[in-house]
Image (cartoon, rainbow, N blue to C red):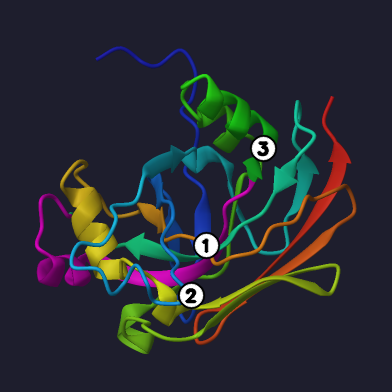
């Protein structure tokens, strides 16, 4: 086989708590509309199915990152989320079997160019332009399921410049982590290194240059990032 004309991009590596090894990110998936604070949707005989989206694995960054305000947006928003880290192949799996494919969990932020997302949605265009940009996916240190099991309860919060902007609890998830993995595995052969957004609790804020973000999930960890000057 002939040599490539340029070197491939190395995968982003995220620290693992208690391990010298790191977690090399393969693909990034996510689901939407997965929090139900008052329990109405969770009580339905058939829960509403979430929408599925993807992001670029190239633009995952770790806690402490300084993220440039992305180009071509006037409404830049964060969403705090529990992140699933996949550690074994998962394809067309049952809910029960899917749990075994989860290596661990982390705190994540789904950063979005919200104005571009709304414009694309109105035109029925793909939403990638709103989700793919440098620094779009901050991620905390990963904690292993062997150390914490699968979290079903715990406060999830996001503060911007010390002000609480999002707050919820993992027990408000409509689709639980193992169910999300099973759902995605119907459509994609998940592989070790994949990470998955699980949805975000209520609350929104528009970010600006200089903002300091602090996300936290009880029993999982913390995530800190700073937004810096706008890209040209």
Q: Which residue corresponds to mark 1?
A: 200
Where the C terminus falls, by quadrant? top right
Residue 187 included in the magenta stretch of the image: no
Label 2 crowding class (10 Å Cα cut-off): few <14, some 14-19, many 20+?
A: some
Label pair 3/1, CB-CB below 8 angstroms: no
Is residue 213 shown left or right of residue 55?
Answer: right
Occupied quadrant, residue 120: top right
Q: Earlier in the sequence, mark 3 or mark 2?
A: 2
Mark 3 or mark 1: name the one nearer the start of the chain.
3
Report how far apart the C-alphas of labels 3 and 1 lie in the structure.
16 Å
Q: Which residues are magenta?
A: 90-111
Assign a secondary structure to mark 2: loop
To which residue does mark 2 refer?
Answer: 37
Splitting the image into 4 quarters, where does residue 163 fall?
bottom right
**Where 10 sits versus 232, above or below?**
below
Say if mark 3 contacts mark 2, CB within 8 Å.
no
Q: What number is the disc on residue 111?
A: none
Taking the spot 86% from the left edge, 68% from the top edge, the residue there is 161
- Quadrant of residue 100 within the rendered picture: bottom left
Q: Can residue 118 be seen at all in this image of the molecule?
A: yes
Rendered residue at 81%/51% (across/down): 227
Question: Relative to residue 107, is residue 190 drawn left or right?
Answer: left
**Image: 116 above or below 219:** above
Between tags 3 and 2, which lies in front?
2
């Amino acid at each position: 086989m002939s040599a490539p004309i340029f070197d491939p991009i190395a995968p982003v590596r995220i620290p693992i708590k208690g391990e010298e090894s790191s977690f090399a990110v393969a693909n990034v998936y996510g689901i939407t509309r997965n929090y139900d604070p008052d329990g109405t949707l969770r009580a339905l005989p058939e829960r509403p199915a979430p929408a599925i989206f993807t992001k670029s694995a190239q633009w995952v960054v770790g806690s402490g990152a300084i993220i440039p305000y992305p180009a071509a947006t006037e409404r830049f928003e964060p969403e705090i989320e529990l992140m699933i880290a996949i550690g074994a192949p998962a394809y067309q799996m049952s809910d029960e079997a899917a749990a075994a494919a989860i290596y661990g969990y982390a705190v994540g932020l789904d950063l979005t160019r919200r104005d571009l997302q709304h414009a694309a949605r109105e035109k029925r265009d793909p939403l990638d332009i709103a989700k793919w940009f440098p620094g779009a996916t901050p991620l905390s240190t990963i904690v292993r399921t062997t150390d914490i099991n699968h979290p079903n309860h715990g406060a999830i919060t996001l503060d911007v410049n010390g002000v609480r902007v999002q707050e919820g609890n993992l027990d408000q998830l409509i689709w639980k982590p193992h169910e999300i993995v099973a759902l995605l595995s119907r459509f994609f052969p998940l592989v070790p290194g994949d990470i998955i957004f699980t949805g975000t609790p209520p609350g929104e804020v528009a970010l600006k240059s200089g903002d300091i973000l602090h996300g936290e999930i009880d029993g999982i960890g913390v995530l800190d990032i700073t937004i810096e000057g706008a890209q040209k």
